[in-house]
Amino acid sequence: MRALRIIIGLGATCAALVFAEAAAARGGDHHDPTPQSDNPPTIATSLPDTLAQPAAARDALAARGFEFGLKYIGETFSDVSGGLRRGTIYDGKLRIALDADLDKAFGFTGLVFHANASQLHGRGIDQFYTGALMPVSNIEATPTTRLFEAWLEQSIAEGGSIRLGQMGADQEFMARASAKIFVNNSFGWPALAIADLPAGGAAFPLSNLGARAKWETERFALLAAVFDGDPAGPQGAFESPDPQRRNPDGLRFRLKDAPFVIGEGQWKYAVDDLPGVAKIGGWRHFGVFADERFGADGLSLADPASVGVPLRRRGNFGLYALVDQQIFKSEAGGAGAFARAEVAPNDRNLVNFYADAGVSFRGAPARPDDLFGVAVGYARVSNGARGLDRDTAAFGNQFAPIRSGEALVEATYIASLVPGWTLQPDLQYIRRPGGNIADPRDPNGVRSLRNALVVGLRTLIRY
């Protein structure tokens, strides 16, 4: 294991010598800004033939319907000012994926299989340095080797399919193509869902057993899925409070928690021959959620007379809408813009409103494979949580900060070094980290965390 970590920390470049060229994974990967295609760029095309094509086995397996993909993302981030404290981290994700066309392999018409797993290492920047609600990185996770997805998909009619198995809801729901280049996790799976759902929901790095149905035409699509509602399960008496540590390998297949249901409708359109898509959807969780402000006795949880046990709320839900629109195109590339908003109840959720918007560009004349983007996000702390802060101030420190919301600006640039290998400098400015929480280093508990400035550098290598 130590040797593996050393290899990964050096960048995993040597793995290109022994792994076959990868085809696009049918399962997708929202951490990869390259559009999914039958022939995604791969670093193998830049290597000598004797190294790029080490195995006739690759072509033989592909002819039988089996395709493998390998991808490494490594990144370093520094909190250069504000947040909990200044500091620098390194983390990485080595992902291997398998796609099998079971029609070609075994004659099962319309049936495919997909699986992917990741080796995750390093430590994230938010827990130790920024204190942010909107995670700085979309690969930040507890170090481990974890199965993420393993599912079967059966085509059932023209445009229709059913998927069963271990899945991530973030791979298909609430997704925008124009937002894929951004590093902050909230531009993928939004901060509202991360903060409000058990274990952050069925989203990277945790997934869960579920079933998904999809029907799609040239202009419309409908998706609906049901998952077990807790990817890690409730915390036991001697278990870690970290849900990722309660399900460290992704093999804790659960079916006995309250279900999580999500549905989405999509409308594909064009404005002056520029394609766009509008989506509207919602989710419902059938579990029990703790009230953010009041106890079971009706008193504020900040009241010294309260029993200190939160009032239990039955169920939870969220509604969202988004638009993803190409705004211009050229021979070299083009630009796309997106906007999204999501709401949830005030009383049982930390975040009750989330919104983001941004624009991304591809294909400068001198750098046709490069990308650039700027995006903003905002997560509003719910009235229930804010009310608890006011109560806490009233019963104790009257000058303690009251949470309000967290705002984010990210600017990022992806430079293509060779096909299949990119370098991505990234800049993020976080206003009111944690939604305006108190600075734990202030002994008086009256100073809020200062706005944080984070700079980073990410590399992605696709084999």
Image (cartoon, rainbow, N blue to C red):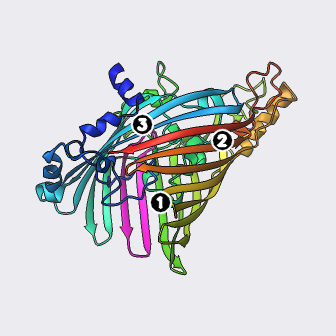
What's the residue type where badge 2 is placed?
Leu
Residue 254 in percent (x, y) is at 37, 38
On the image, numbered disc 2 is attached to which residue? 350
The answer to whether 14 is drawn above or below residue 225 in the figure is: above
Q: Is residue 330 left or right of residue 96?
A: right
Q: What residue do we see at 22% from left, 47% from top?
A: 49
On the image, numbered disc 3 is attached to which residue? 93
Foreground: 241 or 445?
445
What is the distance, in whole Å, between disc 2 and disc 3 at their CAs?
A: 29 Å
What is the distance, in whole Å, between disc 3 and disc 1 at their CAs?
A: 29 Å
Residue 101 in percent (x, y) is at 20, 56
Foreground: 444 or 237?
444
On the image, numbered disc 1 is attached to which residue? 263
Q: Say if residue 317 shows up in the picture.
A: yes
User: Dot 3 lies on which element?
Assistant: strand
What's the residue type where badge 1 is placed?
Gly
What is the distance, in whole Å, between disc 2 and disc 1 at their CAs?
A: 23 Å
Residue 106: assigned label = none
What's the residue type where badge 3 is placed?
Lys
- Magenta span has 30? no
User: Which residues lie in the magenta part?
Assistant: 205-230
Contact between labelled residues 1 and 3, with CB atoms less than 8 Å apart:
no
Circle 2 residues within 10 Å: few <14, some 14–19, many ≥20: many
The answer to whether 16 is drawn above or below residue 110 in the figure is: above
In the picture, the quarter occupied by the N terminus is top left
